[in-house]
Image (cartoon, rainbow, N blue to C red):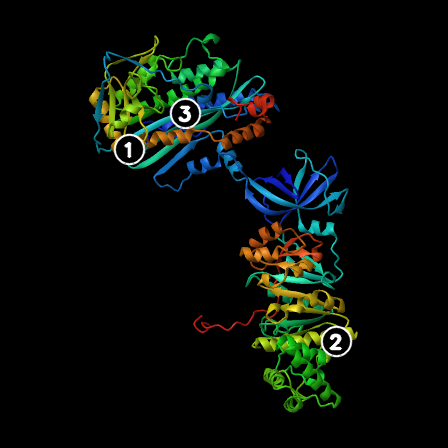
Amino acid sequence: MRLYRKEGNTIQILSFPTENVEKGDYLQIEDPKQNKALITQVIDVQFANVPGILEELLRDSTNDENLNGQDFDPLEVASHVTYIQDSRLLICKIRASLDNGKISPTSTWLPSRSQSIIKQLPTTALLNLIKINHSLPIQLGETKDESPLNIDATALDGKLNIVTGKKETGKSHLSKLLVLSLVSHGAPIVVLDLNGEYAHLGYGADGKKNEYNPKVNVLTPSENFKVTLAQMKLRVILNILIHALNLPGTSAREFRRIWQFLDERATLTLHELGEAIRNWRCNQHVRDALFSRYYALVNSGFFTDNPSESVSLEECLQKIRDGGALVVNLRDTSLVDRQIVVEYVLGKLVDLLTQQKLKAVFLFAEEAHLYLRETYWDDIVTRMRHFGVFTTFVTNQPDTIRENIYRQADNVFLFNFTNEHDLEAVSRAAKVDAETVKSIARDLPSHHCLLLGTAVKDFPIVVRVKALNVQTMGQTRLFFTEKN
Amino acid sequence: MIQQTQYTPTPSKYNFPQTLQDTALPTRFIELSLRSIKNIQDSATLYQPYETITEDSINPTEEITPVFLGQTKLKLNQIPLKPIHEETPVVAIDVSSIKIGETTTGILLAIRGAIVWKNQHHYHYLRIGPFPFHITEENKAEIYQLFRQYSLDAPEPSNHTSTPSLNYMQTRITTLLERWLQMNIATQSQNTLILWDGSLTAGTNDSPTHIVAQLLETARNRLNTVLAFTKITRLRLSGHRLTDLIEKCAPPCLLEMDGYPIAPSTGIQFLGNIYVAKLTRGNCSFRLDIDRKLPREQGVEAIQRLIANEQLAESYPETLRLAHIYSTFTANEVIAIQRLLAQTHGIKTVTRPNIRRLLFGPFGKGPEGG
């Protein structure tokens, strides 16, 4: 390999056919005279712009069955021609520089074009250089050179993470891997499970209970997850009414009075709430508005007047405080009901964290745009983060996550995207340049993930996510199952 | 047909193609090539010319145009052509050379020949080379004599005065290799249309009359017909370009000069009947020389066979086009040869600065001006 050009933080390297370099690989450019080195990452592999190549390809095209021949080339110049034809240009980004063995994120010097020695930097060597902490290891899988890639659970602690990629590239799989790894390190996890994919985390691929089974608690709204109004705080129910059920302000004020009236009498039940709305002295339009929301609450099936049917979310969360996953199964739940449940869960979480009843919680939110109200996004990445809600967004629609969320993300686990619009959205991640994201993500194979951010000390690394011995498949109902 | 070799293949050190198995030149050619390169001192520097120098660019083919005696008025004989659909093999020869660079003692050239033949709707090619040669004042006589020996039948007396200067060696060697290939094809083919790039003008240093005449005779004896196409001609009649005059004729046709061609200088002879050929619709027409010793009708019949047996684009035969394409060097091939020399002899290539650019900046036009 030879150093060809440098422009900004992009370096072009000429590579020859015998050198097996791929996108995502790291190269070390050593300048022996300066005793320095640059650490670069290949973000694209192109054919070298060899002069005369078009003429040669046209001339040597052997597809025409009416044209054939032979070469009498005793000096074997043709092998050199082929060698040059197959030479490649590696487009690399400078990630750091090494000065007397010390790594630095900046590079203010230029290596010698003629004297530099360029060699591949194995991932293990890179990881040793960047000194990733392994006190609480999470094994994500293997890198291209088949060395295991471990990140540290502390790199997710207090952080905002995004797992994104197009459908069926393995993002939910990675997300489950993160959940179980965090659980095994004693972290409490709450999963907002849109498709019921996490409900079987406690079972192995063979359908039998696995080691995580006692630590995975699945709550399905209106089935084993119901609450009484008495368990609710006024703020939470108002959030539900205003944000999930679009209750106008005037009606909300009346509702507040009704709620306080019932609360003072310790009669916070659905039945009493209905009666209070019916008998409350107020404008008829307000009454109608309150009734329509009341019936939405009733029909959700999430609320009950029977205390024995109700679940204490606080108790559930206390159970997992030393490691466990609370999966809120939102499968088969309508949009409004989903929003009601999520408002309740998040409100309860903030309450418990504010009261120091919980130390912190890792929240995994699949396709959060389908249940998270607009104002919650900023809330989650700022206020709730300080309370101790550390969120991981999982989505296959990157444009549903706002730009400021990407900018504040500490870690991005990026799977394959081919759509330019999606790549554009993801490339806003501040952790790496847009070129890297667009070029590498476009060609990632299934179950391969480009890891960006704190977990890898801002050195993007491609990893093949390891298999999990759990029932991980989303249970999509199929029409042709019988025939297949 | 040249595919059907008349020689018994013998094991060879260099695994020659059968068509050239019998001839001694390639062996000597390779050995001389290797020996000449060994003359370059280890770790020497090769100065690459700023621009590509082919045999045409250093010594553009100067067409020797005849004067037609007996011309009293503007008179041309138009010969309409009718294709003769009888299977006839067509073979074409072309040779290219390129200057790879200069050393402190000489010049480094590469040379390559191509033979393309068409038989039963299929085109086949044989490329010979490339062969790099390091030509110095010391070895130029040896190289030139070898070429002459095998291409022109007999070596000239070995003295330095008969050897061209280094500047002309590229053109001379290219022509000599071309003659050698032409001789091989003339010898090995039968009932074949042989296409040459250029004319049948003889009497120059590269093309002595007796050699070209011998080539044509060898071809004739084996019932071959040599047709020589000149891509760019300055043929004129009463001041008019002949290639313009043929525009009015319906293709396929030939224009024949009324008169006898006389060379502008002594020693030059035209061994072919000179025509202007427009074989297809389009803008192009070419000077076509047909062996003069063939009966005129046989020459015309040969061209009628050509238009029936060959693909023609803009009046130019495909075999000759392919021969040119397969012999021509690409920029990448030049780099490949430089790489070969670097690997085998540690020769380092550097590009010479563009002197005109250095001195005159944007006004530095001319051969190296770009």
Residue sitting nearer the eye, A313 or A62? A313
Q: Is residue B12 visible?
A: no
> In the rendered picture of this protein, how many numbered marks are placed on residues?
3
Dot placed on the residue nearer the N-terminal end, 1 or 3 = 3
- Residue B38 position, x and y percent, is 55, 22
The numbered mark 3 sits on a residue in which chain?
A: B
The alpha-carbon separation of the residues under discs 1 and 3 comes to: 28 Å
Mark whose residue sits in front, 1 or 3: 1
Q: Which residue is mark 2?
A: A351
Secondary element at tag 2: helix
Amino acid found under the numbered disc labelled 1: Arg
**What residue sits right under mark 3 in the picture?**
B95
Protein chain holding label 1: B
Q: Up-down: is A63 above or below B346?
A: below
Look at the image and tell me in which quarter the C terminus of chain A lies.
bottom left
State the mark number for residue B281. Answer: 1
Q: Are marks 2 and 3 on the same chain?
A: no
Name which residue lies at 56% across and 19% down.
B39
Measured as percent of width and height from the top left, residue A15 is found at 59, 40
Contact, CB < 8 Å: mark 2 with mark 1?
A: no
